[in-house]
Image (cartoon, rainbow, N blue to C red):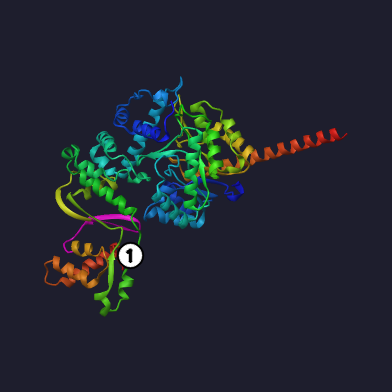
Amino acid sequence: MKRADFPFFGFGVGLRRQHYSHILETRPQMDWFEVISENFMVEGGRPLQVLERIRANYRIVFHGVSLSIGSTDRLNRKYLRDLRTLVDRFEPAWVSDHLCWTSVGGHNTHDLLPLPYTEDVVHHVAGRVREAQETLERRILLENVSSYMSFVQSTMSEWEFLSAVAEEADCGILLDINNIFVSAFNHGFNAERYIDSVPIERVVQFHLAGHSDHGTYLLDSHDHPVREEVWKLYERAVRRFGVVSALVEWDDNIPEFDVLSAIAEQARRRCARSESSQEDKHENRAVVAAEARLSVDR
Amino acid sequence: MRIELSSLQRLVYRLIAEPESIASRLSGASAVEFPGIEAIISGDQRLAAAERLGIYATAYFYRLLDCLKEDYRATLAVLGAEAFQRLIADYLVQFPPTEPSISYAGQHLADFIAKERICTECPFAEDLARLERTTLEVFHGPDAAALDAETTRSIPTEQWPMFELRLHPAVKFLELNWKVSDVLSAVNEKREWSVPARQRSRMIVFKQNAEVYFRALEVGEKRALERARARVTFAEVCEEIAAEIEVDQPAVEINRLFQRWLCEEILVAA
């Protein structure tokens, strides 16, 4: 798998029902929308009708929260069939979900729970990703989750685990920059090292969001603007991964659409700035290398 | 301590969703005791293992509570925030979510209320929760092109008796013992609600232009519409209405009901 297998979509926002009317009535400029799959896995009703109309004017991708790819329950075949039906109907550019587990013993927590990071779990998850990809007949992206606990039995870092699953399953990565920042604080690891360690070709999408500070831990609350520290991490990610489709998430105390749109534009500007500074650096490196070569030749 | 992934997940699930965890969230305790958890979950000076697990236990309960508050706004208004929260804490222990979509989390709430003490304190709460749930199910129910007046006008008179139709697939019926439709309407319209009358009624819940409506069924509608769940001819519908009503000229009443169904978009061509 390589990133070029997926289109570059630019800078988008998560589609939320609070903005349906605004989007339908004013058709605002927006590169793309990310749609929560489960909200549309219903028989009918207004949300599906709205999505039909939005799909007619915008590019979309599906983002799931209940695939439970790390669970030890059997993969939910009905869920996968429903997702496939939705994908066939709306033709999103790609489908993503989270590297976590949400259900066990037939019960759903509706939360994104972390896994122990071990070789055994890499094989377990990768096998299930392949199975899901076969059913959906497409490669999926897996997103790194924010977490508040880790397991004593883990033998590898989160970035090693994420990379190993993606390599073994041959799937893409949705790199959530805010989640890296939040988890780095909560577990005391180095966020920049995380960014620097993920395989470049597998990163197809970035997520940007806000979090809240609870003193002893950060909560991935999606109810604030993107914090400056996260923007800095994003800029670092752009310098490493290049220009990647990026999306702004906001799920609680959702502001006016224009606020989200402005953050997406900020991502665009910061991306351009980071990308050009990287090009400058490349040029500088090329000049230095050329000068070095000349000096050697002399 | 190394533990099989399936055992680990079952343990974590139990600790997050067990009654003690939920009870501690209600009492506002900062942490719950999870004996031996340090051998499984890493803790540090900033946050102990139990506190880390507690973040998930809190999120589990409040995420579901928030969802159910939205799905059962009228039930919440009637019971009050505190009683509703206690109700949901007990409900989640008996009916933990099983479906990938969180919108199913409240699917058993009316049945649960029926067996709870709260049903004695607020005897119409079960009916109200059932009506609210039904409106949600109809909202997400299947769409279908409704039979309209233009189509019916194009049918030659002689073909009317054999004209086949059926009920819109999203339509639902429910039996209620209290006139809770008034309470739900009042809450939806942000008006003050009053205790409903005890009155048996059979309701129809349907959608029109993606909006959900509900009303009591009239005499003459019940059998005809239930029969129209499956493909039925117009003549058969007329027979059902005529069998239920006691008027001298059933044709007038049949015509009135049929016009009403067309306006409400509850019929589709078979």
Residue B32 spot, x, y in % from top left: 34, 25
Quadrant showing the C terminus of chain B = bottom left
Residue at x 39% of width, y 34% of height: B9
| Viewer-proximal residue among B252 and B108 | B108
| Viewer-proximal residue among B124 and A69 | A69
Residue B133 spot, x, y in % from top left: 28, 48
Residue bearing mark 1:
B146
Residue A39 spot, x, y in % from top left: 40, 48
Q: Amino acid at mark 1?
A: Ala
Is B205 inside the magenta-drawn segment? Answer: yes
Instruction: Identify the main secondary structure in magenta.
Output: strand
- Count the marks: how many? 1
Residue A121 spot, x, y in % from top left: 48, 36
Say whether residue A252 is visible: no
Which of the 4 image quarters holds residue B13? top left
Is A143 inside the magenta-drawn segment? Answer: no
Instruction: Tell me if residue B161 comes above or below residue A287 in the rendering.
Output: below
Which chain is mark 1 on?
A: B
| Viewer-proximal residue among A95 and B154 | A95
User: Mark 1 falls on what kind of element?
Assistant: loop
Residue at x 33% of width, y 72% of height: B151
Say whether residue A285 is visible: yes
Instruction: Tell me if residue A102 comes above or below residue A43 in the rendering.
Output: above
Residue at x 24% of width, y 67% of height: B258
Q: Which residues are magenta?
A: B204-220
Query: For the view shown, which residue lies furthest in the top direction?
Result: B45
For mark 1, does the 10 Å Cα neighbourhood hold few (<14), some (14 to 19), or many (20 or more) residues? Answer: many
Quadrant showing the N terminus of chain B = top left
